[in-house]
Amino acid sequence: MKQLWLMGLAALFLSACSSVPDELAVVDEASLVSYKNALEQPEQYIGQPARWGGMIAAVRNTDAGTEIEVVHLELQGWGRPVPSDQSDGRFRAKLAGFVDPMVYKEGRYITFTGTIAAAETGMIDEYNYLFPVLNASGKYLWPIQKEKPQVEVDYSSLWYRHYYFSRPHYPGPVIIRNTQGASEGGSGQSDKGNN
């Protein structure tokens, strides 16, 4: 009984670690075509399923639908793009309907599932570029991750900290400082002499 309980707990833990959002789920993960393969031989993979993602570069809405241009980034096991300074290129995701460019802003991370369509020629600034195209059936706009503040712990004692001959192992209070910028309190002006 104990082994069955442990196996169930392990299966739950492993499925939670690699779970993909419902919008990006596919029946057969092994059949997904990688971005690199579609970039190298776009005609060979037309109609095949794919899951690609990255950073939004542009959003264009027309009466025919929406086209989102994405800077491709590698995906983590659960489908979120890995932030990086390196990219294999860009792709276009085509969607039915309207997508608000104020929500789907440039620089946000997004992942799509869909089928590969014929590549299109376009421009990036003044450079001719061949864009792989994904007819998107699912999309997931990843929430913005807030950067955690970095803290620094000062183990030196408060009253000996500024002296040259301070004892390095003297037990004292632990000071925690936020290293993410100046504090917002006060204007920095002294009240001395304003009696």
Image (cartoon, rainbow, N blue to C red):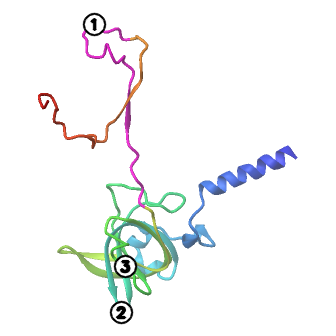
**Residue 93: percent from the left, percent from the top?**
40, 78
Question: Mark 2 or mark 3, which is nearer the start of the sequence?
Answer: 2
Q: Is residue 64 above or below residue 194?
A: below
User: Mark 3 belongs to which amino acid?
Assistant: Asp
What residue span does the magenta drawing correspond to? 144-168
Q: Nearer the viewer, residue 188 or 137?
A: 188
> From mark 2 to mark 1, how far is it between C-alphas?
75 Å
Q: Is residue 168 above or below residue 119?
A: above
Most distant residue in the left direction = 193
Label ID, residue 165: 1
Question: Toward which corner of the image does residue 91 lie, by quadrant?
Answer: bottom left
Q: Is residue 116 above or below residue 54?
A: below
Which of discs 3 and 2 lies nearer the camera? The answer is 3
Label ID, residue 100: 3
The residue lying at 38 percent from left, 56 percent from top is 83
The crowd level at tag 3 (other Cα within 10 Å; few <14, some 14-19, many 20+) is few
